[in-house]
Image (spheres, rainbow, N blue to C red):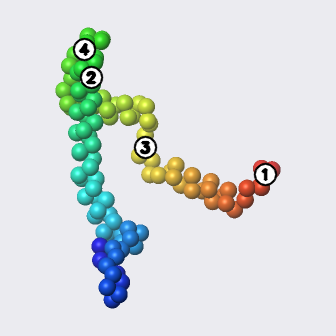
């Protein structure tokens, strides 16, 4: 982003918190476009390799393809981690609880 304090001869990058909202969204979108497929390929490959190494030898199961391994990852995420596409409700609840604790203080007792 742009530099500040150039009149003093110092060049400091603007902190992330001061970037314009549009620039933050552009960087986040670019990072998602790069990192999501990279992690999907990495974890899908590791899952396929581990499955094909262990499962046929131990349980006599068939060898799987890369896309089947990705499907297993998605399915296990849905089954064991649940649905995390709720729009950040849990973060709001945590923030609200912290605010209430800060207002009440450490010595407050429930009525």
Instruction: Identify the mark nearer the N-term, 3 or 4.
Output: 4
Residue 9 as seen in the image, left or right of residue 106: left
Q: Residue at x 69, y 62 (%)?
A: 103
Residue 52: image quadrant is top left
Q: Which mark is residue 56?
A: 4
Instruction: Identify the mark nearer the N-term, 2 or 4.
Output: 2
Residue under numbered circle 1: 109
Instruction: Identify the mark nearer the N-term, 3 or 2.
Output: 2
Q: CA distance from mark 1 to mark 3?
A: 33 Å
Q: Nearer the viewer, mark 1 or mark 2?
A: 2
Q: Which mark is residue 51?
A: 2
- Mark 2 crowdedness (10 Å alpha carbons): few <14, some 14-19, many ≥20: some
SS at badge 4: helix
Q: Residue at x 24, y 38 (%)?
A: 42
Using the image, determine if residue 82 lies above or below residue 22.
above
Instruction: Identify the mark nearer the N-term, 4 or 1.
Output: 4
- Mark 3 crowdedness (10 Å alpha carbons): few <14, some 14-19, many ≥20: few
Q: Residue at x 22, y 16 (%)?
A: 62
- The residue furthest front is 9
- The residue furthest right is 111
Q: Nearer the viewer, mark 1 or mark 3?
A: 1
Residue under numbered circle 3: 84
Q: Nearer the viewer, mark 3 or mark 2?
A: 2
Residue 21: percent from left, percent from top: 36, 69
Using the image, determine if residue 65 lies above or below residue 22.
above
Q: Nearer the viewer, mark 3 or mark 4?
A: 4
Q: CA distance from mark 1 to mark 2?
A: 53 Å
Contact between labelled residues 4 and 3, with CB atoms less than 8 Å apart:
no
């Amino acid at each position: 982003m742009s530099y500040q304090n150039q009149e003093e001869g110092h060049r400091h990058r603007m902190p992330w918190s001061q970037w314009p909202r549009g620039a933050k969204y552009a960087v986040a979108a670019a990072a998602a476009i790069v990192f999501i497929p990279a992690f999907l390929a990495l974890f899908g490959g590791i899952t396929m390799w581990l499955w094909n190494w262990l499962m046929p030898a131990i349980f006599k199961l068939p060898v799987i393809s890369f896309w089947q391994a990705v499907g297993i990852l998605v399915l296990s995420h849905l089954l064991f981690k649940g649905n995390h596409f709720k729009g950040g409700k849990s973060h709001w609840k945590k923030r609200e609880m912290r605010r209430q604790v800060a207002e009440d203080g450490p010595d407050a007792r429930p009525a």
